[in-house]
Amino acid sequence: MWQSYSNGLLITAGLIVALGAQNAFVLAQSLRREHHLPVALLCIVCDALLISAGVFGLATLLLQSELLLSVARWGGAAFLLWYGAQALHRACRPSALQVEGAAPRSLRAVLLATLAVTLLNPHVYLDTVLLIGSLGAQQSVPEAYAAGAASASLVWFSCLALGAAWLAPWLARPLTWRIIDLSVAAMMFAIAWQLIANPL
């Protein structure tokens, strides 16, 4: 159970901290204190729903087909190795999270923008539904894996929303992202090896 939970936590943590539009948006809202808590909550809920759909929807399909299970296993391992290599590449050329100012908006406008940034990005489906979902469907305890994945989202977006003032200068340092990317690469390689060496 704890192995499945930690796998979900580490895989999602490695994916969620990468520089991207969603993180920049949440951090910007948090720095301006403009509906930052509802924004973070909406991101957490969206992640949890997408992850659950991937884990439990794909679990049903994979358990019915050895071929699909094998494809998911090797495809997932290949993606993790590729993602780890990308993180190593980014570590060689670290950048910083940039935040731009904007005029105040209503809660409705901000939440709609959050949904757009979250759900109109094709990478969110590749990450949550396909990658996280297919790996979760192969875990001995998929429920624990999904809980671990959702926990990573909860911790990350809560930190962005509640600790923006402290995190902003930290995330603005290229060295910080070099360390994060090196850690992400190590996690992705370790989990890929576990998937290859210890199939269920």
Image (cartoon, grey):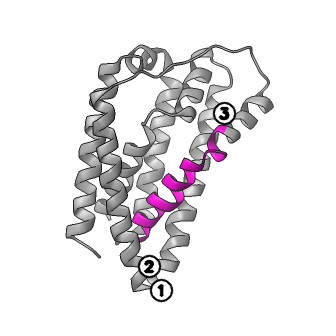
Mark 1 and mark 3 residues within 8 Å of each other at the beta carbon? no
From the image, give the main secondary structure of the stretch colored magenta: helix
Mark 1 secondary-structure assignment: loop
Q: Quadrant of residue 70?
A: bottom left
Q: Position of residue 59 (x, y in %)?
A: 48, 74
| SS under mark 2 | helix
Q: Tell me which corner region of the image, top left, top right, bottom left or bottom right, holds residue 179.
A: top left
First in sequence: mark 1 vs mark 3: 3
Residue wearing tag 2: 68
- Nearer to us of marks 1 and 2 is 2
Quadrant of the image for the C terminus?
Answer: bottom left
**What number is the disc on residue 64?**
1
| Amino acid beneath label 1 | Gln
Mark number for residue 38?
3
Give the extent of the magenta segment. Answer: 117-139
Kind of residue indicated by mark 3: Pro
| SS label for mark 3 | helix
Residue drawn where x is 33% and y is 56% of the image: 7
